[in-house]
Amino acid sequence: MPIDLRIYPDDCDAFGHLNHAAFVRLFERARWDSLAEGPGMDAFQQASAWPAVRRTSVEYLAAAFPGDVLRFEQLVTHVGRTSFTMRQSARRLGDDRLLAAAEFVFVCVDRKGRPVPVPAVIRGLFGSEGGDGASRLTVHGVELSVAVEGEGPAVLFIHGYPLDRTIWAHQVAHLHGARRIAPDLRGFGRSDAPDLGYSMATWADDMAGLLDALGEDRAVVCGFSMGGYVALEFARRHPARLAGLILVDTRAAADSEEGRRGRDAGIQLVRDRGAGAIAEQMLPKLLAPATAKRRPELVAQVESMIRRTPVAGIAGALAAMRDRPDNRPLLPTLEVPVLVLVGAEDAITPPAEAEAMVAALPGAELRVIPDAGHLTPVEQPEAVTREMAEFLRRAGGV
Ligand code: MLT
């Protein structure tokens, strides 16, 4: 839950900037306020487990001044046996500027300072995992948050930019007869977000590592938009593990020169003004105009998904998309069943892109989903799940 705190002159240095040590205190104040508004300030006392800070890392991105009101967001990103990790961010209300991002690692100890298990209450706190059946798996040294549902042949769902696995909520809940695996890519949702190291190849290898961790040799790989770029990279790097492909609102071509310049401008924008500025830029393009008008709750859901995406993930994804290869030569070499889905009103990867892919893919099927823009799985979830179920049935035993 967000916590708003005001900056006072006694938080500031001689130049009137919020002091860096005072900032750490404000992060702590925000954690206490979250406890006070949630399970109570005595939640740790009740469990006889005290969270001792083991590591603090703060990135200070911009100055704050007396009178500014900062919005603090807190998210538990990892819960181990005796330790847990919390990510916090502080934005200024008003210009929505990201001022600092921090990570705190805590070890729970008893009164004698001996490590004790993390209290159960922490697992449900501050928006940590839980509730949607997600778990955390370490893949290539990075913890990924992943929802896994059902039994049957594996279908791996890869979300797009700057989104997370929740875009597949309907498919994960209802695509029966398959083992549905929906991770947050590194840098997104509740997965770890390292500062560097983003590329299509890294994500494709993460997906192969995730299948290893889940004991799956092969999977139908389903990628939405940027997730489609990852799916095609997976097809190039791990062809023996690909049982089929579902490409949703995506394209095979690389970025144009103008597109690459746009990615660089996006990197600058997110570094200067945070994920909120990316939300403003992307929202008008993601949904069909009629959806945006008729379904404000969907707009709010997508907006908050973008706003909670780590800056490192957004900047990393923009660079990875800018540098991705042209996948058109790969298409005719694919020897698996392929379904291509596209929203009839997709403004980012329009139906012409889908048609071009199908023309180059031997035996691929194209389905155009009416009344949907770019975010087809969110705008028309039932139709998308139905098309996928029919494709899996037709493809039989993939
Ligand atoms: C996405 O939806 O994943 C991105 O908008 C794709 C892109 O920008 O190329």
Image (spheres, grey):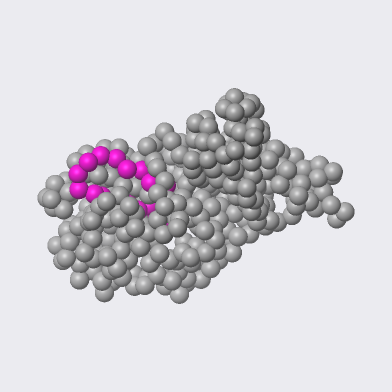
Q: Left or right: 52 with respect to 64?
A: left
- Toward the right, the furthest residue is 14
The answer to whether residue 64 is above or below residue 32 is below
Expressed as whole percent of the image width and height from the top left, the position of residue 235 reads: 27, 65
- Residue at 81% x, 45% y is 11
- Residue at 75% x, 52% y is 20
Q: For residue 160: magenta?
A: yes
- Residue at 63% x, 50% y is 55
**Observer-nearest residue: 64 or 29?**
29
Expressed as whole percent of the image width and height from the top left, the position of residue 362 reads: 16, 66
The answer to whether residue 17 is above or below residue 203 is above
Q: Is residue 137 visible?
A: yes
> Residue 39 falls in which quadrant of the image?
top right
Expressed as whole percent of the image width and height from the top left, the position of residue 369 reads: 27, 48
Q: Is residue 352 visible?
A: no
Q: For residue 81: magenta?
A: no
Q: Left or right: 296 with respect to 179?
A: right
Expressed as whole percent of the image width and height from the top left, the position of residue 214 reads: 30, 49
**Observer-nearest residue: 176 or 162?**
176
**Observer-nearest residue: 321 or 282?**
321
The answer to whether residue 311 is above or below residue 27 is below
**Observer-nearest residue: 164 or 32?**
32
Q: Quadrant of the N terminus?
A: top right
- Residue at 36% x, 72% y is 325
Q: Which residues are magenta?
A: 145-163
The number of numbered discs placed on residues in the rendered structure image is: 0
